[in-house]
Amino acid sequence: MDAREILTRYKEGSLDRGSASQLLGAFAVRVPGTLPDPAAGLSGAAEVPGVGLAAVPDAEGTQDTRRSEGSEGSEGSEDAGERFRDGFAAPGTGTDDVAVVGLAGRYPGAAGLDAFWRNVSEGRDTATPGPVDRRGAPLLGDGERGHLLDAVDEFDPEFFGIAEAEARRTDPQERLFLETAWEALEDAGCAGGRLDTLTGPDGEPRSVGVFVGAASADYALLAAESQADGGRRAPAHGHWGIAGRLSAQLRLNGPAEAVDTSWSSGLVAVHHAVQALRRGECAAAVAGAVELLLHPSRGRSGAGEGVGAVVLKPLRRALADGDRVYAVVRTSSAGSVAPTAAPAPFGLRETRGATVERVGDAGAATGIAALTSAVLQLWHGVLAPVGEEHEARPWQGPRRALVTFGEDEQDGEGAAGPRGPRAHLVVEEFVPRESREAVEALLTPAAPKTVARDEHILLSAPTPRHLAAAARGLADWLDAAGPAGVRLPALARALRAVRSAHPCRAALRVRDVPELVASLRRFVAEDDSMDLRDGGGDPFGLGGLPETGEYLAALWRGGHVEQLTGLWLSGVEFDWSVVEGGASGGRRHPATPLPASVFLRRPLWLEGAGPAPGPQERRG
């Protein structure tokens, strides 16, 4: 895809502004902090009438002359990275850079990352006397405060096709990480057919590694105690099951590891994922950590909980796939001394101490909370308050962060007893060669917010209740964004191409965003959907015929989207991105924001392990 195609698709409405901006800016990636070449334009941009880019002053009206570590100025130098087939060049060391393309998490006082960022950027104290709906004995004593999650006993087994009995004996940490990892994959646009395009060196699809930090086993202890009250069930797995569950659930063909290195577990898990990507063991990776405080023996003032996950890809692959890049991991290490800041300074040092102020002593999840906080500060260009500070402030200088957990932070330097290893990550802002201002100028004026043709909006979910909840959630999300904030063709394509297909399906034909919102509300009230759970889909077996792929592609080329939609509704399984991409396989799918899937959670706990809390169902 060259600049002409990007601009054409943007003007047609099939690319949203953010995706077009990142794709145009990424045609020639520069080393973070170096000066753009005024003579260099976008590849293919000169062929578009009236299109041309030059260096643009930064916000202060001066040319950006920052230089990063190892940069000597020339864009063509080896340090600038190897040019490769799609016209991109990775910054820094090129082949070693790893992109953060998906994020998700739940932290104290924050059911999602939008709320977490508000807490971090505003310096909110998330400590409370403790959740009132926890099972069993109170976790905190009188006067004690902790940073704890809500509704940790709740789970949505139907969404993942897990039997209730199995869900009850599954550690809530495993359940919580499964939901969070799914949300991170959705955020990365990798929850549907795109997983199959992630092939490893052996050609196997779904080459995705899973690396999870976990250090506590409270649920197993509760299970042992519940036997005195007649309980007979125990958790089915140890910590490995947290990684293994996700890998098995999604049929992933990559390494699956659990990591227990105390507070640094989350960072070490990310380090293992980065190394696996660099060794070519997987095409992408999910890395994260989880910590829940479930047994009163570990209750203490200042205790914390959390779960977080990131989706990682080699930067070159992320750019080729058109992914949104939140940040770039330049280096990672475990058990060694933290990298020095010279010659390029770190604008942010995210330490265990700073993270504990925000989420409490969250055990294995402390590291992933620190990385998530750093990435969000890089993404928003804002340094969050910490310590005695009370106000966030704009980032000055290069957006470069060191996330570091050292021995001196663990119970004091020289303390006796075992300690987790040190772990460090150097994370940077992703900086396209062309400035954001230049790309925005290229895209102005924006295309009209309504389109002259109908769009087919496809929705699917595991059950009719999930489908209705998804429709309601999408309508609420659209209302919040407003018609001016959503490009309907880009939304329609994203829902087709990057979301997983489930057996309960619906299709809405609409012309603009207000009509879509009204249609979604009407669908929720009338529940007019296709339910293929009885196995009656694809009655003629078209999905299994080798000729079907070309037939579907011909329908797309002929503009017969109505007929394609009908086949999809009837249960014919196919990858929309491949159908739309033709011979190229539709690999490039520029990121378009979408709301997360809706989980219909309900309390599920060990039998005989304490009374159930009041609420019987919550939507999350």
Image (cartoon, rainbow, N blue to C red):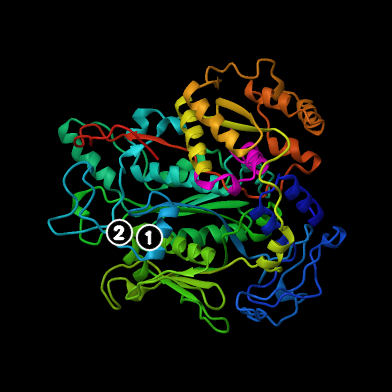
Q: Position of residue 111 (x, y in %)?
A: 38, 49
Asked whether, in this view, residue 168 is left or right of residue 15, the answer is left
Pointer 2 and pointer 1: residues touching (CB < 8 Å)?
Answer: yes
Q: Which residue is mark 2?
A: 126
Residue 483 in magenta? yes
Occupied quadrant, residue 613 = top left
Q: Position of residue 602 (x, y in %)?
A: 33, 34
Label ID, residue 119: 1
Range shown magenta: 480-501
- The amino acid type, in three-letter code, at marker 1 is Asn
Q: Considering depth in this image, is 216 or 315 the residue closer to the camera? A: 315
Residue at position x 53%, y 81% from top? 345
Q: Considering depth in this image, is 368 or 518 the residue closer to the camera? A: 518
Q: Position of residue 237 (x, y in %)?
A: 37, 41
**First in residue order: circle 2 vs circle 1:** 1
224 is higher (above) or lower (below) than 109: above
243 is higher (above) or lower (below) than 274: above
**Mark 2 packing: few (<14 Cα in 10 Å), some, or many (20+)?**
many
Occupied quadrant, residue 98 = bottom right
Label 2 SS = loop
